[in-house]
Image (cartoon, rainbow, N blue to C red):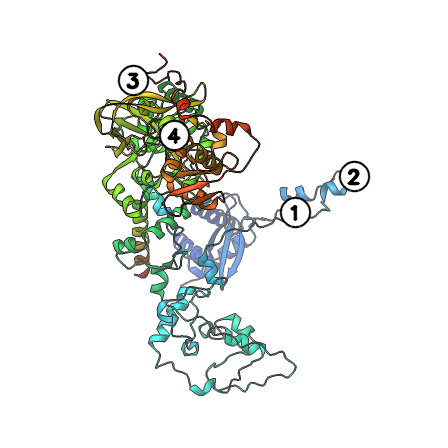
């Protein structure tokens, strides 16, 4: 089960750090959904 | 072969010495006390060949020579004779027994010191029991232990109960660990797919009564997937009924009469597939998000809810790993630290410049950072994030333009009207009396980015504009949730001038307004002028303009601030005006009789309306029973001399006021009957004739009075 805002936030933080600049909330949300999608696809495989 | 004669004792000694040297040479690299072993057979073969003797003779000679020699020890292992020696001579087995260890001496000293107080050595008090603070546990784990109800999948929501008895027991893993929930779910899926094969006999549970004893009820309350083979799961062995063969035959269940019957146990939740568990999550509003759907589709449908949920979660993070300013987010670890000295420099620089400054200006002028540097965006965010948390700084920007004001900066718009008073005077806007525009007109203003409005006397005099809905449609909204004000720049293309305007946003029951236009209004406009506000090239830039006409000269209402008295003054103006709202002496000769109440008094709208009705109304009663007839338009103009107000507010006040009566024949004409009082001043004022009004002394020159003439001079 995915807990939105808790699951894989470390990966989101890692992406935010690596980008080196502040991100808009829309961009942040899109990236987080991408991370979650990848996560669940890997789990299902 | 003839037997060899027996060896002499000297020969035996020589033989023993030879064998000793031989074995020491063999273990030349051994430790001096390490055993060196050699079998009798090997020694015999070697020595018989060396001394040209037969082996039985040599074997007997070796046995005799080494038996009495102290350097050798004889061993017999598995029927074979071995001789053992060492480089130092006789081999002595090592004794590893430790009879003098430090550990033993430490705990059992030979001469222990005397103990006067046993509590020094042994504590008689219990150790403090550490309390476990409650920690927030994710919903995931609460669902796993059954503390929360798991969200129902859509496909099972309408199907009702699922036959849990159709599922085979799931064996434990080879390591003996308990099966994980996902394994249970997978087992359920396999069981569903193999449904015909594992279908139990229908009669297996047919005779089960509705009410069962506790043991049976507990057994049925557990999902059947949790009933493994007895030899594999220890828990099963502890169960009251050991299910050797769970589906073998119907067990006769005999309810015990004294036992308390339990409620029928609800069936376990329906099984869900593992794929749905991992791809679907539910938001707080109950909407289910399936991550298998395309990203754009998800954002289009649930974008605002997802955005809000993510922001809330980030703000709730106890570690505060991600921080935000406005709609921008940045790792807290990457935020550049600004010390007190940096903040002091920023504050002094803003005060030196005398107006709010952009974040980019501050970084460029104080920290010498420019946009070409890689960490520029991080610097911008860090500066804004830090200043937002400091009480000496205030954010006065709009979305996309981060302006910062500092403590010590002079007020925009002066102090003629206090903020608390203006908030009360404009409270009618948040009380539902804002009639500045219809909803479709608001959309038009927003789309066109331009607004035309007329300046009432109060707005012209004090340089303030009530923040009506129409002006709000033009201006940007607050960029931050708790933002109090914003500073905009109004450019006048007709006069090549620029004015800073402060927008005070509505808070609670206080209305909002714009201030800072006093100088521009007094320089170029008159009360009743029609002005146009338009958006500029930047979110904080606006253009103020008016239609220029031929020169007009009129006696227009003004306020002598020193005498605190209203009067008419000759004005020469070039701006287009709304004739109905122009407070000139020709149309509104009684306006100068209005009392310039203290600003705190003007918030009493009913009192102001009564005063305005008495001054502006025509006397239609008698001296003993005064009664005034007054038009709504006159009330509106005069009311807006003393304080801002809308037609909707004045209509509401008239309807609520018992002393106002609408005229039966003329629309928007009202009669006002003032309450009788012993105040002679009112009567004296009523006796003033029109001639007296015309001959009223003019106010003294104003501080902005550059273009209008004064009759006194």
Q: Position of residue B484 (x, y in %)?
A: 41, 35
Q: Nearer the viewer, mark 1 or mark 4?
A: 4
Give the mark, 1 or 4, whose residue is nearer the N terminus: 1
Q: Residue furthest top?
A: B713
Could you tell me which chain the residue with mark 4 belongs to? Answer: B
Left or right of B125 in this view: B139: left
Q: Relative to B506, is B252 above or below?
A: below
Q: Nearer the viewer, mark 3 or mark 1?
A: 3
Q: Which residue is mark 1?
A: B128
Q: Which residue is mark 3?
A: B707
Give the mark, 1 or 2, whose residue is nearer the N terminus: 2
Q: Which residue is mark 2?
A: B116
Could you tell me which chain the residue with mark 3 belongs to? Answer: B
Left or right of A14 in this view: B509: right
Q: Position of residue B379 (x, y in %)?
A: 33, 30
Callout 4: helix, strand or loop?
helix
Residue B213 seen in the figure: yes
Kindly indicate whether the residue at mark 2 contacts the one at mark 4 (C-beta within 8 angstroms): no
Badge 4: how crowded within 10 Å, few (<14), some, or many (20+)? many
Q: Nearer the viewer, residue B293 or B354?
A: B354
Give the mark, 3 or 2, whose residue is nearer the N terminus: 2
Q: Quadrant of residue B678?
A: top right
Kindly indicate whether the residue at mark 2 contacts the one at mark 3 (C-beta within 8 angstroms): no
Residue B320 seen in the figure: no
Q: Position of residue B48 (x, y in %)?
A: 41, 56
Image point 35% across, 11% down: which residue?
B713
Q: Which mark is residue B458?
A: 4
């Amino acid at each position: 089960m995915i807990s939105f805002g808790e699951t894989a936030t470390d990966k989101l933080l890692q992406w935010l750090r690596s980008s080196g600049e502040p991100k808009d909330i829309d961009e942040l949300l899109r990236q987080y959904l991408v991370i979650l999608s990848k996560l669940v696809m890997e789990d299902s495989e | 072969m003839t037997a060899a004669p027996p060896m002499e004792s000297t020969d035996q000694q020589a033989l023993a010495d030879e064998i000793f040297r031989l074995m020491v040479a063999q273990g030349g690299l051994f430790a001096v006390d390490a055993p060196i072993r050699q079998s009798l057979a090997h020694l015999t073969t070697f020595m018989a060949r060396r001394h040209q003797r037969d082996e039985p003779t040599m074997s007997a000679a070796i046995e005799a020579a080494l038996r009495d020699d102290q350097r050798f020890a004889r061993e017999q292992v598995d029927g074979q004779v071995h001789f053992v020696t060492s480089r130092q001579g006789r081999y002595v087995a090592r004794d590893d027994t430790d009879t003098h260890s430090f550990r033993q001496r430490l705990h059992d000293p030979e001469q222990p010191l005397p103990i006067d107080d046993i509590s020094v050595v042994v504590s008689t008090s219990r150790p403090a029991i550490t309390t476990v603070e409650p920690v927030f546990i994710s919903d995931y784990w609460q669902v796993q232990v059954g503390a929360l109800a798991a969200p129902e999948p859509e496909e099972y929501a309408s199907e009702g109960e699922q036959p849990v008895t159709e599922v085979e027991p799931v064996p434990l893993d080879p390591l003996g660990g308990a099966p994980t929930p996902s394994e249970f779910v997978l087992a359920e899926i396999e069981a569903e797919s193999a449904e015909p094969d594992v279908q139990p006999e229908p009669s297996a549970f047919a005779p089960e009564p509705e009410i069962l004893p506790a043991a049976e009820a507990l057994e049925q309350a557990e999902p059947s997937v949790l009933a493994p083979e007895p030899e594999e799961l220890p828990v099963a062995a502890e169960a009251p009924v050991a299910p050797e063969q769970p589906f073998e035959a119907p067990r006769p269940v005999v309810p015990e009469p004294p036992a308390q019957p339990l409620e029928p146990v609800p069936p376990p939740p329906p099984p869900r597939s593992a794929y749905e568990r991992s791809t679907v999550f539910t938001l707080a509003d109950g909407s289910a998000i399936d991550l298998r759907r395309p990203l754009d589709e998800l954002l289009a449908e649930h974008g605002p809810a997802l955005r809000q949920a993510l922001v809330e979660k980030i703000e709730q993070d106890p570690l505060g790993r991600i921080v935000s300013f406005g709609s921008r987010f940045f790792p807290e670890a990457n935020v550049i630290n600004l010390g007190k000295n940096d903040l002091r420099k920023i504050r002094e620089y803003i005060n030196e410049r005398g107006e709010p400054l952009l974040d980019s200006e501050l970084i460029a002028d104080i920290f010498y950072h420019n946009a070409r540097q890689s960490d520029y965006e991080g610097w911008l965010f860090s500066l804004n994030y830090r200043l937002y948390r400091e009480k000496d700084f205030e954010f006065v920007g709009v979305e996309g333009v981060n302006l910062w004001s500092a403590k010590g900066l002079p007020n925009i718009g002066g102090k003629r009207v206090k903020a608390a008073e203006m908030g009360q005077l404009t409270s009618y806007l948040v009380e539902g009396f804002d009639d500045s525009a219809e909803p479709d007109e608001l959309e038009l203003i927003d789309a066109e980015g331009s607004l035309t409005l007329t300046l009432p006397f109060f707005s012209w005099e004090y340089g303030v504009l009530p923040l009506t809905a129409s002006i709000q449609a033009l201006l940007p909204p607050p960029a931050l949730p708790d933002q109090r004000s914003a500073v905009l720049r109004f450019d006048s293309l007709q006069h090549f001038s620029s004015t800073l305007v402060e927008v005070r946003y509505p808070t609670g029951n206080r209305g909002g307004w714009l201030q800072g236009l006093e100088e521009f209004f007094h320089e170029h406009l008159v009360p009743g002028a029609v002005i146009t506000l338009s958006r500029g090239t930047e979110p904080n830039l606006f253009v103020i303009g008016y239609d220029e006409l031929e020169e007009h000269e009129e006696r227009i209402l003004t306020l002598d601030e020193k005498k605190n008295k209203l009067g008419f003054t000759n004005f020469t103006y070039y701006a287009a005006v709304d004739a109905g709202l122009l407070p000139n002496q020709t149309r509104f000769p009684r306006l100068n009789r209005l009392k310039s109440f203290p600003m705190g008094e003007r918030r009493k709208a009913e009192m102001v309306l009564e005063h305005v009705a008495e001054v502006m109304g025509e006397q239609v009663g008698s001296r003993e029973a005064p009664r005034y007839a007054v038009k709504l338009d006159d009330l509106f103009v005069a009311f807006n001399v003393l304080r801002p107000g809308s037609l909707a507010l004045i209509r509401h006040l008239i309807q609520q006021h018992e002393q106002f009566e609408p005229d039966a024949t003329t629309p928007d004409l009202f009669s006002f009957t003032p309450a009788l009082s012993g105040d002679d001043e009112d009567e004296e004022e009523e006796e003033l004739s029109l001639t007296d009004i015309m001959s009223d002394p003019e106010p003294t020159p104003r501080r902005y009075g550059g273009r209008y003439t004064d009759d006194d001079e």
